[in-house]
Image (cartoon, rainbow, N blue to C red):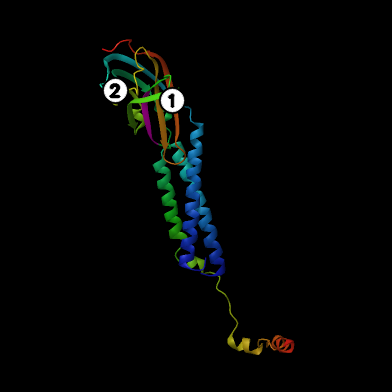
């Protein structure tokens, strides 16, 4: 500690070590938050349902999405990415996931929302398996913290069914 | 900066940074604001820099007392003749 440079170096090293440590504790403190997210999705209308010229099924839906993700936000949360996926099983693949809608939620105040929207991304099956298909609508979310590990979870809503005929 | 001053500077640096970190975390957590935590800690680092890095007078209260040159001449350094003799004998 005899010179200016040596003291500056020691201070910087120790300050950054402690900074890393408080960030680690901040990240750890997220484990004690009580998370009770909820979501409901209704299919208001099937706008159209057709077979594309080259054989893939495509459907357009109007969705009513109600969700409360406020409890995911802690003091260490930067933003939450949420998306709705249609999930169904075909003879070829045990799980097909098609993203229909997504959003980035930057603030806790915007995490409780209600939105009525037709699917943002096209709901196309790779084949022609959609007629009369039972499927789940799943709300997935990824929580992006300011420091620490990103984590993801989902709510699965089942009991949706596509019509038996194209329209 | 003398020896005592160096010890004091190092201890002050460690204690002040730890206090800043603890205060920043507690205030940040209770107000649920990550930004507040970072600002308090940055302030703490700034204050610590100002206190411990410049060579303040209070780090120089224990100057070393060197012997007078005349005193040193009365006690001449021992000559290192013995070791050179050993080396030559080994040859």
Between disc 1 and disc 2, the foreground one is 2
Q: Residue B72's image quarter?
A: bottom right
**SS label for mark 1:** strand
Residue A10 position, x and y percent, is 50, 60
Q: Residue B55: in sight, yes or no?
A: no
Residue B4 rendering spot, x and y as whole percentages? 56, 66
Q: Does the magenta stretch include residue B7?
A: no
Find residue A73 and report its image quarter.
Answer: top left
Q: Taking A91 as reference, is B91 left or right? A: right
Q: From the image, give the main secondary structure of the stretch colored magenta.
A: strand
Q: Is residue B87 visible?
A: yes
Parent chain of label 2: A
Residue A154 lies in what quarter of the image? Answer: top left
* Residue A145, image x, y percentages: 42, 37
Which chain letter matches label 1? A
Tell me which label, 1 or 2, sits earlier in the chain: 2
**Who is closer to the viewer here, B57 or A113?**
A113
Task: Give yes or no for residue A79 being in the magenta stretch.
Answer: yes
Element assignment for label 2: loop
Residue extent of the magenta highlight: A78-85
Image location (x, y in percent) of residue A38: 41, 21
Q: For this rendering, which residue is in front, B52 or A25?
A: A25
Is residue A142 positioned above or below A114 on the image?
A: below
Q: How crowded is mark 1: few (under 14 residues within 10 Å), some or many (20 or more)?
A: some
Residue at left offset 34%, top offset 29%? A109
Asked whether B88 or B66 is in front, the reply is: B88
Q: Is residue B32 above or below residue B61?
A: above
Residue picked out by circle 2: A119
Q: Name the residue under label 1.
A: A154
């Amino acid at each position: 500690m005899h010179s200016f440079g040596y003291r500056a170096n020691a201070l910087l090293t120790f300050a950054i070590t402690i900074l890393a440590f408080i960030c680690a504790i901040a990240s750890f403190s997220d484990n004690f938050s009580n998370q009770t997210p909820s979501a409901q999705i209704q299919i208001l209308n099937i706008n159209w349902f057709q077979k594309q010229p080259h054989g893939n099924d495509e459907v357009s839906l109007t969705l009513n999405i109600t969700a409360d993700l406020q409890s995911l936000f802690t003091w260490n949360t930067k933003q939450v990415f949420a998306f709705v996926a249609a999930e169904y099983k075909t003879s070829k693949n045990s799980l097909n996931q098609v993203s229909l809608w997504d959003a980035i939620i930057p603030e806790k105040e915007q995490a409780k929302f209600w939105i009525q929207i037709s699917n943002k991304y096209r709901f196309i099956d790779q084949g022609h398996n959609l007629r009369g298909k039972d499927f789940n609508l799943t709300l997935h979310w990824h929580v992006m913290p300011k420091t620490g590990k990103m984590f993801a979870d989902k709510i699965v809503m089942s009991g949706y069914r596509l019509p038996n005929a194209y329209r | 900066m003398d020896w005592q001053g160096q010890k004091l500077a190092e201890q002050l640096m460690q204690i002040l940074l730890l206090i800043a970190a603890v205060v920043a975390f507690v205030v940040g957590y209770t107000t649920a604001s990550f930004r507040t935590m970072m600002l308090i800690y940055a302030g703490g680092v700034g204050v610590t820099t100002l206190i411990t890095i410049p060579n303040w007078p209070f780090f120089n209260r224990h100057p070393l007392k060197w012997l007078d040159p005349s005193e040193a001449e009365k006690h001449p350094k021992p000559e290192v003749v013995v070791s050179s003799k050993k080396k030559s004998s080994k040859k």
